[in-house]
Amino acid sequence: MLAQQQKLQFSTFSGLYDLIVPKDNLLRKINDLIDFNFIYKELVDKYCCDNGRRAECPVRMFKYLLLITIYTVSDVDVVERSRYDMSFKYFLEMAPEQEVINPSSLTKFRKLRLKDTDLLNLLISKTVSIAIEQGIIRSRSIIVDATHSLSRSNPYSALEVLRERSKLLRKAVYAVDENLKERMPEKNTSGELEKELAYSTALEKFIESDQTLSLIPAVKEKLNLLKEAIEDTQENYTLSKDRDAKTGHKSSDSSFFGYKTHLAMTEERIITAAIVTSGEKGDGPELPKLLQISQNNGIEVDTVIGDAAYSGKDNLELTNQQDIKIVARLNPSIAQGFRKDEDRFDYNKDADMFVCPAGHLAIRKARQGKKNIGENQLQTYYFDVEKCKRCPIKENCYKEGAKTKSYSVTIKSDLHQQQIAFQETGYYKEKIKHRYKIEAKNSELKNVHGYDRATSYGIENMQMQGALTIFTVNLKRILKLTY
């Protein structure tokens, strides 16, 4: 029954499509290029075939989401446009007179049908396979980079959140017993976060000391909210409705709150792999996964092109093992020795600083040791020790009572010396010219298809948004190269 719904609903008016929708229409070309039945096969298990009312065709629902991405419109607007736009109806395989869906169905489709589906890898793999079949991909290089997307929710000041949560808790307490006002800790009236945090902690302890009061449901609920805010403030200094978004750094004095999408792309500008992370993650550590996904998708790789973030020691060792060249300017500050993954500090090439496992950026750096005396120099990065004192994972890297917190890396190694020599070759100088292409692709994702900001909360929704956006730009690129 569900499969039958995929077929175009012919009517006496179907001939209008040939008159109204031209052969070079983008949506007609997409329909001709790709068989969307792979969506049906992927999602069929999400439906019940013998119970409940008739479901909307999953292929059509997916196409609605694709239209939203292609034209950067809302759920309501895409449904309204599909009511009168014949190219939309043709793309959705509807009869001209057929009634449209309710916009709320799209929300349910995202939550119920696409949940737990690896849509990102599925859609990228599909477009890469089409590009390979069409003979579009001839190069054996991938260009790597990361682009950031702002969270849908702006971060709140930690001070504002603590103040609001403590206010709600006091109101809940006063509703039980107004006489407790006189016994409450003295409120903080300054704009200092430290004092607000101290007050909130004192208020939490005061309420918890009265077991009868703290167990009243209305009070307990607000108390838990305050405790949660205190913990989040100590860890992140930034709070938001978007729990998965984090603060990342575009430079030493410029930051953003949201997500990063790490991309791999061929010289023909077909995206072959993507990984969505929170904003504070480093670029370099994602290279092994980008390389593996690209290879799994059928791409033969002999060269990786990127910026200084990808020339870390681990990446150089990995690519050497596979006889792959890294065309990335060497930054001597990236060697990390033999630290465990959970103790790693990631290098942020935009800020030219290291970021600790908790996401805090170093505040300054200094070089130690002398040149040309037979020993490697060290680059030492210094962190805000006040943040370290309150960090929830400080036991991994901060010694209690220490007045400073620093992190040092070796500036050169034999592997780096080989990379320095490679940077002088003609092959390197020729390949590095292709790096600009991924910057243009990032611009297309963000400025044409709305990938500059998340449309929903949470990393799973960001992955879904990334899947549809990358699927769109890959299809458009394939069409451009084949027509």
Image: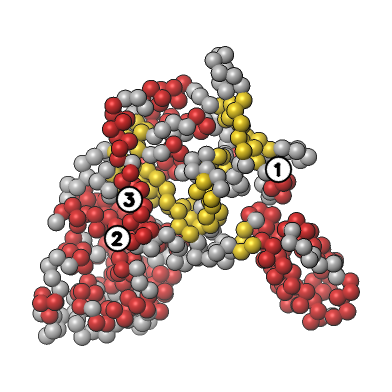
Q: Amino acid at mark 1?
A: Val
Mark toward the start of the polypeptide (1 vs 2) = 1
Marker disc for residue 440? 3
Q: Nearer the viewer, residue 352 or 445?
A: 352
The secondary element bearing badge 2 is classed as: helix
Q: Which residue is mark 1?
A: 385
Q: Amino acid at mark 2?
A: Thr
Q: Is residue 318 visible?
A: no
At horizontal 72% and vertical 74% (from top left) the residue drawn is: 168
Quadrant hosting residue 76: bottom left
The secondary element bearing badge 3 is classed as: helix
Direction from residue 174 to residue 358 in the image, left or right:
left
Mark toward the start of the polypeptide (3 vs 2) = 3
Marker disc for residue 472? 2
- Between the C-alphas of marks 3 and 1, the distance is 39 Å
At horizontal 45% and vertical 57% (from top left) the residue drawn is: 149
Task: Tell me the mark number nearer the camera, choosing from 1 and 2.
Answer: 1
Count neighbours of disc 1 (C-alpha within 10 A) and say few if under 14, some if 14 to 19, many if 20 or more: some
Task: Tell me the mark number nearer the camera, choosing from 3 and 1.
Answer: 3
Question: What quarter of the picture does the N terminus occupy?
Answer: bottom left
